[in-house]
Amino acid sequence: MSTVLILYGITVILMILHLFTRNTLLEKACSFSLILSFLSHLVYTILLGIRIGEIPISNIPQAVNMMILLASFIFIVAVLLKNAISLGVFFAPFALFTLSLVSGFLGFDHIMVHKLGFWFFLHTSCVITGDALFMVSGIASVVYLVHERFIKKGSIHSAASNLPPLVLLDRIIALTLSTGFIAMTVGMIIGGFWASNAGLKLSLIAPKIVSGAVMWIIFAFSLHQRFAIGWRGRRTAVITFAGFVVMAMLSILIEILYPGAHGLRILP
């Protein structure tokens, strides 16, 4: 993991330098560094899976690691297809910081996924995918709000002018939010099947159900207001960012206060 963290750190430095200099060579270096960081991260995750004999998604650190990996891939697609390299300035530091927090716990407290059944694997995969997409939409929302603020103040300088257009950011938010909401909804439904088949008591998984329902309502409200009412731009960005913050806070609180909220510790 140390190699992965170093590469993400180099990416952060290159991204920041490019944001303020708009150098063409630096832009290419940023893209290369981001792709190299992702590939290194992918190799590490594959090796971790081989070492533990399972796809590494069975505990919170592993899920966070996988979420960052998927988000990195999504950002690379955005960079290559939409020429939105400056998005990485906001994502790379977040990825570096988050991976630094969980890197020491990826191989501990492991529960064999195959013992929990196919429904658990499918449920967890959908939820992690949804969280990764929400992460992208949350970061894109921050970039949108920052760029819009510069425009309203009339203080456009080299750094701000290098940010992606507001129209593009709005499209990225809408696409990732919609796709993430579908993945999250499917994951919640499948989670119900898994909990029923596993015979878990409602009292044990209630914290997860409540936190999931809160996040679902927030993102559902954002999508409803966008497609039914016609909200665009700043309003969608604010709600989406708020939803991402709530998602992160609830995930941390549930893990601290209710470490057995998935009912995993009572399974044989």
Image (cartoon, rainbow, N blue to C red):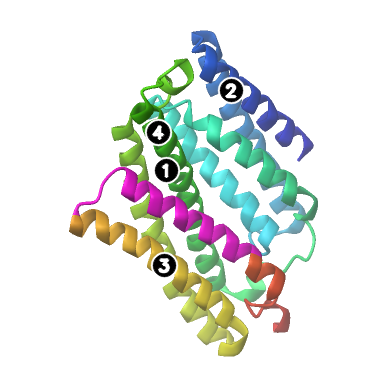
**In this rendering, the label closer to the viewer, 2 or 4:** 4
Vertical arrangement, residue 147 with respect to residue 19, above or below: below
The three-letter code of the residue at mark 4 reads Arg
The three-letter code of the residue at mark 1 reads Ser
Image location of residue 212, percent across then percent down: 49, 70
| Residue 104 within the segment the image draws in magenta | no
The kind of secondary structure element at disc 4 is helix
Of the two numbered discs 4 and 1 on the same chain, state the one appearing first in sequence.
1
Tag 4 residue: 149
Separation of disc 3 and disc 1 at Cα?
18 Å
Q: Is residue 22 left or right of residue 156?
A: right
Separation of disc 2 and disc 3 at Cα?
34 Å
Q: Callout 4: 10 Å neighbours few (<14), some, many (20+)?
A: some
Label at residue 132: none
Label at residue 16: 2
CB-based contact (under 8 Å), mark 3 and mark 4:
no
Q: Which residues are magenta?
A: 230-252
**In this rendering, the label closer to the viewer, 3 or 4:** 4
**In this rendering, the label closer to the viewer, 4 or 1:** 4
Vertical arrangement, residue 268 with respect to residue 123, above or below: below
Tag 3 residue: 216
Q: Classify residue 220 by image quadrant.
A: bottom left
Tag 1 residue: 141
Image location of residue 47, percent across then percent down: 72, 46
Of the two numbered discs 1 and 2 on the same chain, state the one appearing first in sequence.
2
Q: Quadrant of the N terminus?
A: top right
